[in-house]
Amino acid sequence: MPDDRTDFIVVSNRLPVDRVVDADGATAWKQSPGGLVTALEPVMRAADGAWVGWAGQPDLDLEPFENEGITIVPVPLSERDIELYYEGFSNDTLWPLYHDVIAQPSYHRVWWERYVEVNRRFAERTAEVSAEGATVWVQDYQLQLVPRMLRELRPDLTIGFFNHIPFPAYGIYSQLPWRTQIIEGLLGADVIGFQRAADAGNFTRAIRRLLPYSTRGSIVEVPDGDGTREVVAKAFPISIDAAAFEELAQRPEVVARAAQIRHDLGDPETILLGVDRLDYTKGIGHRLKAYGELLKDSRIDVEDTVLVQVASPSRERVETYRQLRDEIELTVGRLNGDFSTISHQAISYLHHGFPREEMAALYLAADVMLVTALRDGMNLVAKEYVAARKDEDGVLVLSEFAGAADELKAALLINPHDIAGLKDTIMQAVEMPRADRRRRMRSLRKRVRDNDVAHWSRSFLDTLRRARAES
Ligand code: GDG
């Protein structure tokens, strides 16, 4: 066994670094500024941690390397793996199924077989780099079989799993031809984390329907050799690095940029903002419908109101996403054609990604933030908007179907399917007096500050430590 194995390992589909090639053809690695990396950085550093994952390009078979104090352990994926395991089973079976079948999931046995194969590759790679008794934290729906595979290879490890997306009710989950294998896969972990208490409840109910294991509260008794092993399944709502986001949004250049954005939009009275990956779970169509009707009813006027919609490109090789893009862009084009004037656009639609500084400036400029997801594990955009608003201004309109609604009760909560209700709530947000805006934003900010991403990772890892000590 090599002696450079590590005590703390995070496993996720994508590595937290991107490979960049400069003009001379030299390659380097750039850390992507994800919340997960930020949250785990202190733990990673203290434990000399490693990160196991795919580097984002096909057929890259690389040896582990060091990047900013973290050992990066690449897992190679071929074009075919990407097609079947990632775009297929992960993004066209599990993603729509776990988001309450908003889009129809496809069930293909070859996708499943490749999902099993790729999960095994991740488990094997992780087993190789983990020191005796190490702690491994597996992330998300692409890797649900890894906990059990890893436990079989390395019973000495402490294994955690966190599901970033919802876990559906049994009536929906039961469609999955491989429903029992997935549950068994997850139960290889010592602790299984979900975004909401409702997700954890759906998971334990699915266990009771499918397997002869007993559950009490968040504890599942899983047979293990001659005895049983206790697995914890409960909610750990994820968050953001609130302090860092607040600091970013206060930088003079970001504040100046926010003022410039408002000016460039024609100094409207009200800027409404939507920021989403272009995904059918985010309810962008419902938002546009409500906004279009408000314009049609003359309850708002393009002369003083604008909707800025950032739709960052996502999963563009999956057919459902191509269709969604066409539908959204048709709607945006129609609304702009019908309502824009030479000097004022109804919707400023941006189909590209932006640097974080620009996102922060947009949050600062927006009077009303629209989060209208039809289903969303958490929704970090809602929390970022709140963290950015140190001025205690701005109104958050938030879907009750986003995990964030469990915590952010001082937002204006909406059911995005209720278009009449959504329209009224948007008007309530636009017309809300300053004192009410301040009261609500203050309460939201306290929540996001107290429960930041460091709190999330600490409480998960503490539970994992305790669970292992007790067993
Ligand atoms: C999954 C779950 C859960 C977006 N466009 C740009 C950009 N973003 C950033 C946002 C935010 C993140 O991406 C999106 O996070 P969300 O939580 O809103 O949504 P998903 O991507 O669907 O994430 C979700 C999350 O996992 C964590 O567990 O909350 O429910 O679906 O941080 O700011 N960032 C930059 N440019 C963009 O154009 N820089």
Image (cartoon, grey):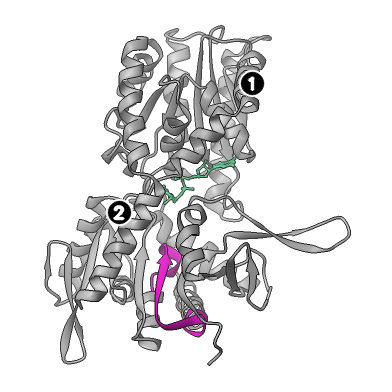
Which quadrant of the figure has residue 221?
bottom left
Q: Residues within 10 Å of mark 1 (few under 14, many from 20)?
A: few
Q: Left of 230 or right of it: where is 465? A: right
The residue lying toward the viewer, choosing from 49 and 11, is 49
Secondary structure at numbered mark 1 = helix
Secondary structure at numbered mark 2 = loop
Question: Is 168 placed above or below 117 here?
Answer: above
Q: Position of residue 159 (x, y in %)?
A: 35, 74
Question: Is 77 placed above or below 446 here?
Answer: below
Q: Position of residue 284 (x, y in %)?
A: 47, 34
Q: Position of residue 427 (x, y in %)?
A: 37, 14
Residue at the image point whose x is 32% and y is 71% from the top: 186
Dividing the image into 4 quarters, which one contains the C terminus? bottom left
Q: Which residue is mark 2?
A: 236
Q: Which residue is mark 1?
A: 256
Range drawn in magenta: 125-145
Residue at the image point whose x is 42% and y is 19% from the top: 393
Residue at the image point whose x is 47% and y is 13% from the top: 295
Q: Left of 440 or right of it: where is 89? A: right
Image depth: mark 2 or mark 1 in front: 1
Residue at the image point whose x is 17% and y is 62% from the top: 218
